[in-house]
Amino acid sequence: MRKSLLLAALALSTPALGATPPEGVPFEPRRGFFTETDLGVFFTVGGENSYSNAQSYVQLGIGYDLTERLSLGAHFALGSSAQNCFAGYLPDSNVCALSDNFTVAFGDLTAAYHVRLANRFYLTPKVAAGYTRLEPRPVDPEDGDPGQSINAFNAGLGIGIEYATSFDHFSVGADLLGRYIIGPNIMTFAVFPRVKYTF
């Protein structure tokens, strides 16, 4: 009698167990207000030397996920161009008319679109636009003090990946971001891993 009751109970409970996902409710990454810290490498292309030496790059950002797929952000970034001359050489020499080493500071607004590739894993194409400060002046040696800084607008495109970790709130990823500085006509690239915290 007891065996019959036990078998009946198991038979009735099997459909319910089969309908429950192995981990309970399906995983959904956090969306909302976030901050991020990014460290990587930065370089410029073009100029007399074709490309600069790779230098350190740091970026801090805040943003908000408007939907599951669309995010907006504001980012401040700092990099430097080393050994790449954009002002041309002095006559009959290999000496740059201005400094071939300069810092590049960005203040940008960004928009990213999240394309789901797999559970927790996303492809993140993005656009960026904002303001740039270059110091000291790397172009136009005839325009004033060569040691002063100049400001210009920038626009860029990027591609990245993002993974929602098993640690609640944290995502990690990596980006390649190219920006064109309008006016000085300097192309820059940054490659960096990302650590994102969503509240």
Image: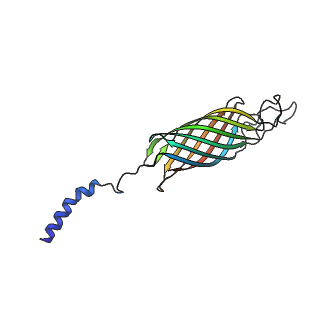
Q: Is residue 109 left or right of residue 99?
A: left
Residue 66 in picture, x, y percent from top left: 47, 39
Identify the residue at the far right of this view: 92
The residue nearer to you, when weighing 57 against 176, is: 57
Residue depicted at 27% across the width and 58% down the height:
17
The residue nearer to you, when weighing 9 against 197, is: 197
Name which quarter of the figure residue 149 lies in.
Answer: top right
Residue 18 in picture, x, y percent from top left: 27, 55
> Can you say which quadrant of the picture contains the N terminus?
bottom left
Q: Is residue 128 left or right of residue 167?
A: right
Identify the residue at the far bottom of this view: 2
Residue 112 in picture, x, y percent from top left: 52, 39
Identify the residue at the far left of this view: 1
Q: How is the image coloured?
A: rainbow
Figure check: 78 above or below 15: above
Name which quarter of the figure residue 108 lies in.
Answer: top right
The residue nearer to you, when weighing 49 against 167, is: 167
Q: Total number of numbered labels? A: 0
Residue depicted at 68% across the width and 44% down the height:
78
Residue 94 in picture, x, y percent from top left: 84, 36
Q: Is residue 155 left or right of residue 113?
A: right
